[in-house]
Amino acid sequence: MGMSTRTSGPKSRRHRRGGHAPMSEINVTPFVDVMLVLLIIFMVAAPLLTSGVPLELPSAKGKQLQAQKTEPIVVSVAQDGLIYLGDEQKDTMTLEALAPKLQAIAKARGDTEQPIFVRGDKSVPYGKVARVMAQIRDAGFRKLSLVTQIETGG
Protein backbone atom coordinates (compact mmCIF):
# COMPACT_ATOMS: atom_id res chain seq x y z
CA MET A 1 0.00 0.00 0.00
CA GLY A 2 2.47 2.44 -0.80
CA MET A 3 1.95 5.48 -2.82
CA SER A 4 4.60 6.91 -5.09
CA THR A 5 5.30 10.61 -4.74
CA ARG A 6 7.30 10.86 -7.91
CA THR A 7 5.45 12.60 -10.72
CA SER A 8 6.36 12.75 -14.33
CA GLY A 9 6.27 15.91 -16.39
CA PRO A 10 8.19 19.12 -17.03
CA LYS A 11 8.55 20.11 -13.39
CA SER A 12 10.41 16.98 -12.48
CA ARG A 13 12.90 17.45 -15.33
CA ARG A 14 13.55 21.05 -14.39
CA HIS A 15 14.53 20.10 -10.88
CA ARG A 16 16.92 17.46 -12.13
CA ARG A 17 18.98 19.89 -14.28
CA GLY A 18 19.68 22.47 -11.65
CA GLY A 19 16.50 24.46 -11.67
CA HIS A 20 16.53 26.18 -15.07
CA ALA A 21 15.79 25.07 -18.57
CA PRO A 22 18.24 26.11 -21.32
CA MET A 23 17.42 29.41 -23.00
CA SER A 24 17.20 29.29 -26.79
CA GLU A 25 17.13 33.07 -27.40
CA ILE A 26 20.10 35.29 -28.22
CA ASN A 27 20.66 38.25 -25.95
CA VAL A 28 21.42 41.25 -28.21
CA THR A 29 21.81 43.83 -25.44
CA PRO A 30 25.64 43.55 -25.21
CA PHE A 31 25.87 43.72 -29.00
CA VAL A 32 23.78 46.91 -29.10
CA ASP A 33 25.90 48.43 -26.32
CA VAL A 34 29.12 47.77 -28.22
CA MET A 35 27.67 49.18 -31.44
CA LEU A 36 26.56 52.39 -29.71
CA VAL A 37 30.01 52.87 -28.18
CA LEU A 38 31.64 52.36 -31.58
CA LEU A 39 29.21 54.79 -33.18
CA ILE A 40 30.08 57.47 -30.64
CA ILE A 41 33.81 56.86 -31.10
CA PHE A 42 33.57 57.20 -34.88
CA MET A 43 31.37 60.29 -34.64
CA VAL A 44 33.99 61.98 -32.46
CA ALA A 45 36.98 60.76 -34.49
CA ALA A 46 35.64 61.48 -38.01
CA PRO A 47 36.19 65.27 -37.94
CA LEU A 48 39.73 64.70 -36.72
CA LEU A 49 40.55 62.50 -39.72
CA THR A 50 40.06 65.29 -42.25
CA SER A 51 43.51 66.74 -42.51
CA GLY A 52 44.82 69.42 -44.75
CA VAL A 53 45.62 73.07 -44.87
CA PRO A 54 42.53 75.03 -43.82
CA LEU A 55 41.69 77.31 -46.72
CA GLU A 56 38.62 79.23 -47.76
CA LEU A 57 38.52 78.39 -51.44
CA PRO A 58 36.91 80.71 -53.97
CA SER A 59 33.66 79.61 -55.59
CA ALA A 60 33.23 79.08 -59.32
CA LYS A 61 30.82 77.38 -61.67
CA GLY A 62 32.13 74.30 -63.37
CA LYS A 63 32.18 70.55 -63.43
CA GLN A 64 33.93 68.39 -60.92
CA LEU A 65 37.04 66.63 -62.25
CA GLN A 66 36.96 62.92 -62.84
CA ALA A 67 38.93 60.68 -60.48
CA GLN A 68 42.63 60.43 -61.28
CA LYS A 69 44.56 57.21 -61.71
CA THR A 70 47.31 58.48 -59.44
CA GLU A 71 47.08 60.71 -56.41
CA PRO A 72 47.78 64.29 -57.55
CA ILE A 73 50.30 66.53 -55.85
CA VAL A 74 48.57 69.32 -53.93
CA VAL A 75 50.16 72.75 -53.54
CA SER A 76 48.33 75.15 -51.22
CA VAL A 77 48.77 78.89 -50.77
CA ALA A 78 47.41 79.86 -47.36
CA GLN A 79 45.86 83.15 -46.28
CA ASP A 80 49.15 84.31 -44.77
CA GLY A 81 50.97 83.63 -48.07
CA LEU A 82 52.79 80.48 -46.93
CA ILE A 83 53.16 77.71 -49.50
CA TYR A 84 52.37 74.15 -48.40
CA LEU A 85 53.17 70.98 -50.28
CA GLY A 86 50.74 68.14 -49.70
CA ASP A 87 47.75 68.09 -47.40
CA GLU A 88 49.60 68.67 -44.15
CA GLN A 89 50.50 71.96 -42.58
CA LYS A 90 53.98 70.88 -41.56
CA ASP A 91 55.44 71.04 -45.10
CA THR A 92 55.79 74.79 -45.62
CA MET A 93 58.35 76.04 -48.13
CA THR A 94 59.59 79.01 -50.08
CA LEU A 95 58.71 79.69 -53.70
CA GLU A 96 62.28 78.89 -54.82
CA ALA A 97 62.29 75.48 -53.06
CA LEU A 98 58.98 74.44 -54.64
CA ALA A 99 60.25 73.39 -58.09
CA PRO A 100 63.05 71.04 -56.94
CA LYS A 101 60.77 69.42 -54.36
CA LEU A 102 58.03 68.82 -56.97
CA GLN A 103 60.55 67.34 -59.41
CA ALA A 104 61.87 65.00 -56.71
CA ILE A 105 58.34 63.80 -55.89
CA ALA A 106 57.51 63.22 -59.58
CA LYS A 107 60.78 61.34 -60.08
CA ALA A 108 60.12 59.17 -57.02
CA ARG A 109 56.65 58.33 -58.33
CA GLY A 110 58.01 57.67 -61.81
CA ASP A 111 55.37 59.87 -63.43
CA THR A 112 56.53 62.68 -65.69
CA GLU A 113 52.94 63.73 -66.42
CA GLN A 114 52.09 64.14 -62.73
CA PRO A 115 48.92 66.24 -62.19
CA ILE A 116 49.26 69.12 -59.71
CA PHE A 117 46.33 70.75 -57.92
CA VAL A 118 46.86 74.33 -56.78
CA ARG A 119 44.68 75.47 -53.90
CA GLY A 120 44.73 79.17 -53.09
CA ASP A 121 42.82 80.90 -50.31
CA LYS A 122 40.42 83.45 -51.74
CA SER A 123 42.00 86.24 -49.70
CA VAL A 124 45.47 85.63 -51.18
CA PRO A 125 46.41 88.16 -53.89
CA TYR A 126 46.14 86.74 -57.39
CA GLY A 127 49.79 87.59 -58.06
CA LYS A 128 51.00 85.22 -55.36
CA VAL A 129 49.02 82.29 -56.79
CA ALA A 130 50.18 83.22 -60.31
CA ARG A 131 53.84 83.18 -59.17
CA VAL A 132 53.33 79.72 -57.64
CA MET A 133 51.77 78.46 -60.88
CA ALA A 134 54.60 79.96 -62.95
CA GLN A 135 57.17 78.26 -60.74
CA ILE A 136 55.39 74.92 -61.22
CA ARG A 137 55.27 75.39 -65.02
CA ASP A 138 58.97 76.33 -65.06
CA ALA A 139 59.68 73.05 -63.26
CA GLY A 140 58.25 71.22 -66.30
CA PHE A 141 54.76 70.33 -65.11
CA ARG A 142 51.97 70.88 -67.62
CA LYS A 143 48.94 69.37 -65.87
CA LEU A 144 47.92 72.18 -63.54
CA SER A 145 44.47 72.55 -62.03
CA LEU A 146 43.11 75.28 -59.79
CA VAL A 147 40.92 73.92 -57.00
CA THR A 148 37.73 75.85 -56.20
CA GLN A 149 34.51 75.17 -54.39
CA ILE A 150 31.48 74.43 -56.52
CA GLU A 151 29.25 77.49 -56.54
CA THR A 152 25.84 76.84 -55.04
CA GLY A 153 22.67 78.76 -55.65
CA GLY A 154 21.78 81.03 -58.52
Image: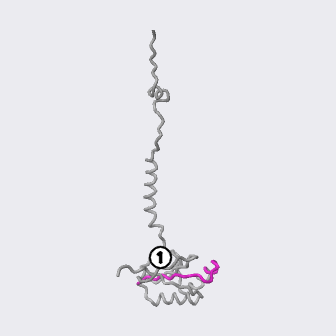
Quarter of the view holding residue 100 = bottom right
Helix, strand or loop at label 1? It is loop
Question: Is-magenta flag for residue 28?
Answer: no
129 and 26: which is toward the camera:
26
Instruction: Provide the residue span drawn in magenta.
Output: 105-122
Q: How many marks?
A: 1
x%, y% of residue 11?
A: 44, 27
The extreme top residue here reads 1
126 and 61: which is toward the camera:
61
The extreme left residue here reads 154
Question: Is-magenta flag for residue 111?
Answer: yes
x%, y% of residue 61?
A: 42, 83
Is residue 101 in view? no
**Residue at point 46%, 50% (across, down):** 31
Is residue 26 in view? yes
Q: Which residue is mark 1?
A: 53
Quarter of the view holding residue 143 = bottom right
x%, y% of residue 123?
A: 41, 84
Quarter containing the N terminus: top left
Q: Would you place residue 31 above or below residue 64 in this image?
A: above
**Residue at point 50%, 29% (across, down):** 17
x%, y% of residue 12?
A: 46, 25
Circle 1: residue type:
Val
Label 1 packing within 10 angstroms: few (<14), some (14-19), many (20+): many
Quarter containing the C terminus: bottom left
